Amino acid sequence: MLTVTTAATNSRLLDVAVVRGVLEIDGSAEDATLQGYIDRASDMIARHCKRVFGSESVSEQFRLDTLQEELILNRYPVTGDPVVVENGITLTVSTDYEVDRAKGWITRLYNDRPCWWPICKVTVAYTAGYVLPAAAPQALQQACIQLVKALYLGADRDPLIRSESVTPMSSASYFGGSDYLPPDVLGLLKQFRKFK
């Protein structure tokens, strides 16, 4: 069970100035429109990846009914040292457990060696995510740029048309599936998507 103790203050993956530069827009007259596209693209990416990218403090409870090799946290990357409480006893980082911050995995230690997490209740309080938009990974920002660009340039047409043929009998083929994200965006997001 996951409880958010301090919610993310920002979910935008890009700053409007970056989008203005990419789209070669001078001045701030379209900033409100661009900000709307950034918000929409950031939300679409977060939903597709099944993640919250903004930095949040959370408390996650595990009720282990079998031995576990690692605790796999719901949110990552982890910043700072998580506070781990096992059966009411607070554990010490580096002595009782170690953290793979990038993956969000916690490994139990005994005599400085990895061991199994026992069958018990474990609570982990931690902060995870990126300070947005500045600390978002480049690939994530690029995916958002591509999606904002597609939304902006496709505002007056159907953005899901993949190809169109105009002959005596017209036809069109469309992109589909996976929140209707363009293929270039999907390729950039593969590394960030949770499958659980």
Image: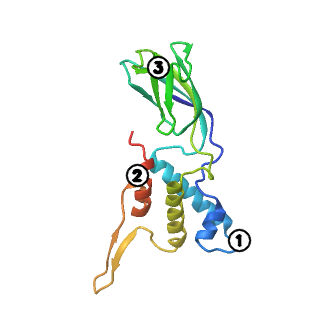
Q: CA distance from mark 3 to mark 1?
A: 59 Å
Closer to the observer: label 3 or label 1? 3
Q: CA distance from mark 2 to mark 3?
A: 35 Å
User: Residue 179 got which mark?
Assistant: none
Inspect this view and state whether residue 142 appears: yes
Q: Is residue 30 above or below residue 76?
A: below
Q: Quadrant of the C terminus?
A: top left
Question: What residue sits right under mark 3 in the picture?
Answer: 112
Residue in view at x 36 percent, y 65 percent: 175
Classed neighbour count for the residue bearing mark 1: other residues with Cα under 10 Å, few (<14), some (14–19), many (≥20):
few
User: Residue 29 got which mark?
Assistant: 1
Q: Secondary structure at mark 2?
A: helix
User: Residue 190 got which mark?
Assistant: 2
| Residue 130, horizontal then vertical, whole percent | 59, 45
Q: Given the image, on which type of amino acid does mark 2 rest?
A: Lys
Which residue is nearer to you in this view: 92 or 27?
92
Image quadrant of residue 195? top left
